[in-house]
Amino acid sequence: MNKSLKSVPAINKQELLFHIAEHFPATILSITTDAGRSYTGVVLTIGKVRTDEAFLVLQVTDDRNALTTRFLHLTVGKIESIELINPADLLSILSLGKLTKNETYEVSGKLAVQRGFQLFSEAIFNAHAINVGVPVMELPTDGLQLNRVLKLTQKIQQVIIDLLKEEDALSGWKARYNKIAFINNDDLEVKGVNDLVEIYFPFENIEAPEVSAEKLTDLLMSIL
Amino acid sequence: MGLLEKRALKAFQDGSYIKLTDEINAITGYTLEFEVNWDSLAEEGYSTEYYDEYFTKVYFTPLITALKEITADDMGKEALKEALKKVIIKNEAGNVYGSTAYKFGDGVLTIDHRSFANVDNVTERSTELGELLMKNL
């Protein structure tokens, strides 16, 4: 986590508070004003007035972090510091959603992955009446790596289902491909080889980030 | 172990045990080796009239349920045949929950659960056993 936090971009208080209010409204904040007073609570609203000055309304919490009927209306410019108390996803908050904490993996067996591959094919067929094939892959033996393969399979499945909602993508895939393979690799790549779609990704690296749906969609579109 | 317990164990071995292992072998599609520590199953101080019901519920019904789920397709049958060779049943460590009663390694499933405790927790044991087997297949 600390290593990931070093890569978050610098942001100002206003950006941070807008992001928290929109995406993590339950995050408890301890706000210290430039007058040296501290208030703990959750952001109710944050907005800008005509003078372009941002203000926020904080619902104050008590010592046990329970919400009270006390509210603080404060200009963002008066805030000296913001402390985040037990945030759900600090990495996402501080990166304004650009980064998220890595997926955690449990142990899976090969059978679960093989069944996941079968379901992958069936789910896409049920959604679009197209046979993309059952993924072929040289499976790792480590249970955590197998769990990552299983989770990635489900994500890739969703990306393909979403992509094939477009008629031209569906007809392009139908015309060219009926097999699919997952190949362990350092980077995300997609290749169309005859009737086979090859998806390269760090399937076995449990420290690597999850597959980006956007990038995978773009790469799949490039071979259709 | 007294004569009463010995007779009750024999009755179970000659009756339900054969039926249960036959059922299990029919589910798996191959013959599983069973090793049962019968002496440990016959806990002192418990009525022999419950042997049949309790041994079945504690040791065999969860196994049957888990194996049925795994062998629901050909992939599962093949994976099971490759991985599970033997089942050991005993009552030695004093385990009373599925979370601690099952161990799997080197093709051997060990079921070590008290024979007269949490008898009706069949679903809990089935779930724990199913998850353990799935992680190892």
Image: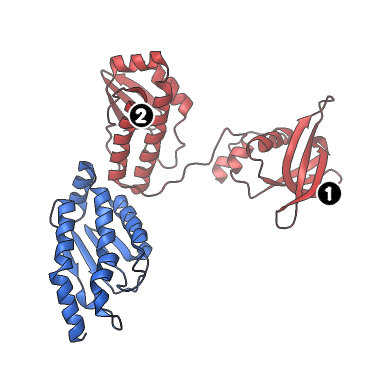
Chain colours: A red, B blue
Q: Quadrant of the N terminus of chain B?
A: bottom left
Judge the density around disc 1: few (<14), some (14-19), many (≥20) Cα neighbours within 10 Å. few
Marks 1/2: CA–CA distance? 54 Å
Marking on residue B4 = none
Side (left or right) of B44 relative to A6:
left
Q: Which residue is mark 2?
A: A200
Q: Position of residue A111 (x, y in %)?
A: 27, 44
Contact, mark 1 vs mark 2 (Cβ under 8 Å): no
Tell me, yes or no, if residue A58 can be seen here.
yes
Q: Position of residue A154 (x, y in %)?
A: 39, 35
Q: Residue at x 20, y 47 (%)?
A: B77
Q: Which amino acid does the dot numbered 2 rest on?
A: Tyr
Q: Earlier in the sequence, mark 1 or mark 2?
A: 1
Secondary structure beneath disc 2?
A: strand
The vertical placement of B123 against B94, above or below, is above
Q: Residue at x 29, y 40 (%)?
A: A115
Q: Residue at x 74, y 47 (%)?
A: A41
The vertical placement of A188 against B116, above or below, is above
User: Which residue is at the far right?
Assistant: A35
Q: Nearer the viewer, residue B122 or B89?
A: B122
Q: Position of residue B10 (x, y in %)?
A: 15, 76
The vertical placement of B75 against B108, above or below, is above
Tell me the chain of label 1: A
